[in-house]
Amino acid sequence: MLKQYVFLIFALLALVFPKKLYAEESVIRVTGFNFPRNRFALVHPQGLPPPLMYGTRILYGLLKEPGYFGNSGTVTCSVEFTPFVDKVVSGALVTQDGKLVVDVFFGGLSNIELSSEEVIELKSFLTSGGVLYISGYGGENSGPQYNTLFEGLGLSDYFSYDVMSVGPYVQSETPSVQTPIIDGPFGYVEELLHGNFRRLVVNSMSGVARSKLFNEYILSETAYGKGYLIVTADRIYIDDYIRRDNDNYNYFLNLFALGCKHQPEKEISVPSFKQGISPYDGVEPYWENFIYDQGDKQDLWCGETMNECGCVVTSAAMILKKYGVNMGPYNEEVNPDSLNRFLGLFGASHSATRDEIPLTYYSSLGYMYGNVVWDAVGWYSLFARDHYPSQTILDQPIYEKYSLFSVKDHIDKGIPVILKVKTLRGGFHWVVVKGYDGERLVINDPATPDPSFGRFSTLEDFGYVPASGRSVVYFIPANTDYSSLIVKTISPIQVLLVDNFGRKTGQENTEVVEEIPESVYLFNEAQENPGRVGVLYTLGEGTYELKVYRPGSGCYELFVNETAGNTGGVVVYGANSQGQAELKSLNKSDIVCVGGNEILDFGIPANLDVKPGVETNLWYMNNKCVTPVGMILRNGFDYRRLDFSSFEFGPGRAKMIHETPKIIDLDGDNNLDVLMYFETEKVGLGIGNTRACLIGKSRGGIDFEICDNVQIVQ
């Protein structure tokens, strides 16, 4: 009796103080199985209110109550019953282009097994955003008929043939999880009344409520595609239960409210992952307390765990899944955990100095001092393709400055983007933009819970503002040339790259230049720790990245701009056209070559050949003659980039006899080499010397040393 009074009080409160659920659509279109396929059908076959024998008049009446569903109701959509069906046929619930014909399919019971056509249509209905309710029943053989649906959906849940006899009216346990139906616009649902029920085995879905007597689930729910699936082990929507228990009443009103959805103007389906959700107990997601990069071995600004630092890697995992990269290179499912482990491969520690303070940092295949090497996301898809040939591979990342028009254009083309945003707390964070609604961008946020079913999140919901500079990163599927040259530095150290033609990219004096074709230079601020309290970000904290797409074969002068008290902290990445990558650290300016026999090579691309054309380099100590020395250039290196006035040979640091050497192809590779002459006695080679070395500089002032073996003769 007490629950009946509570039921009436809740009903009156809902009418007087409605909790508004705003929606763009004005109608919730409902269909389901007809009588006798569902003995407890919701409407008469002719669309009239259900006969008394159906036992569903109360729920029908509540759904047609304007104070609940309608312009002035708790939910601002009215409920419209379209003809219920004896069977589901193709196109009855969703059009070929994925548009819903109805919003809620109230299946209830089914006295026959679902056909393959019905399974396919119901799956499409869920995938496209429909709400599907099905039920078992312990009073007759009803429930296992839906097992073909579970199989078709790829779920391992099922109805067994066991009947759990509990008597006519038994309460469930309080729901163990919060769902959009448990906590909906008509109030929070607690214990549910039920009777004899069909045993429901829950594996893939979320078990919501158990029977008190048997500790078996009587209710499970799951989001599926854009839709939502609800399964009960008993027909707890009938009059006998709703009349006696306001929790049953609220549950089904909340269920139908899911059909009143506000859809954004444009949205791409992108799977959602989380870097971590408060209270960060390591349960959901399980990786939230795992170490990010080598966070426990280096002092990253964000912290050391995935929940503190993992917004970029989590966003990248969403993009991989969106494009169908479901399995990784090591036979693991793609998620932030597996991607984090891949990006950390080949990790090594390095030493640097910042503001005269020693710093240990790590670089790896996909990380440099905690910042992601974006190209490694494409490498991940490429290596995974070796094991899963049907999977997509992603092209090299594309960086753009933010503009609303450009982002919306990408969304219209089906391309989600990863966006760097500034938070209300002043730090920087990354999210996935998957749609728009007018001027608002629809996002998957790695750091916050997903919105309830039928809702969506925007930048404005969290006070996020697009960051300046190249804050947009996106990938497209492709099978292309993966060759690249990437230089990453720890701020405040910056670099300048000069190609064979004197074109420059990087920081020159106080200006950023990007003269080298297909090159970019950008700054990635340190990622914000979403759970940190207090100081969040120091201006200028982060890493710089210089990238040349498809550089071909050749050499570059790389100048490291080390300010006072700041040295080291430079890592160079190179990849060939097949995506095979190498990385090496630098502590000073150097020459960097790509596209040769080595993916990545440092130093002057040259060999020293004492006495060119002679097999044995015999060196006569007291010889007063002249000795020829050849500098054999490789990788198309241009001799005009050398400062010949700086050349010195041997321990005696002998200078060339002539100021200008002879330029000639010494090895027949059609590349011009350098032929020099030195006075033998001035070279200074003596007993014990087995190598003769030439030192010098490039025109840009980069030092080099190359050597050749010699045999001393007295």
Image (spheres, rainbow, N blue to C red):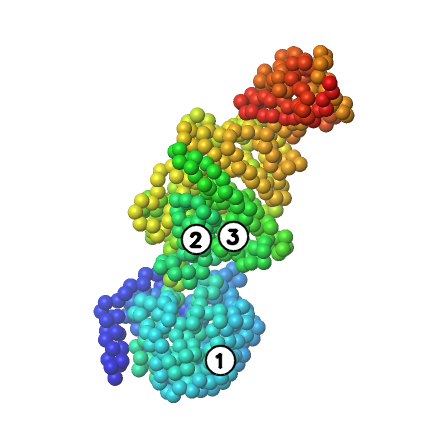
| Amino acid found under the numbered disc labelled 3 | Arg
Name the spot of residue 289 as percent of width and height, x first.
42, 56
- Is mark 3 in CB contact (under 8 Å) with mark 2? no
Q: Earlier in the sequence, mark 3 or mark 2?
A: 2
Label 2: which residue? Answer: 306
Instruction: Report the quarter where the C terminus lies.
Output: top right
- Label 2 sits on a secondary structure element that is helix
Residue 143, disc:
1
Q: Position of residue 331 (x, y in %)?
A: 58, 58
Disc 3 designates what residue? 341
At label 1, the amino acid type is Gly
Q: Residue at x 76, y 25 (%)?
A: 616
Residue depth check, mark 3 versus mark 1: number of the one nearer the observer: 3
Distance Cα–Cα, label 3 vs label 1: 43 Å
Quadrant of the image occupied by residue 668: top right
Mark 1 falls on what kind of element?
loop
Q: Is residue 544 above or below residue 120?
A: above
Q: Residues within 10 Å of mark 1 (few under 14, many from 20)?
A: many
Question: What is the x, y in percent for residue 92?
Answer: 50, 69
Res. 492 in view: no
Give x and y (percent) for residue 18.
26, 67
Given the image, on which type of amino acid does mark 2 rest? Met
Give the residue displayed 25% in from the left and 84% down from the top: 1
Question: Which numbered dot is residue 389?
Answer: none
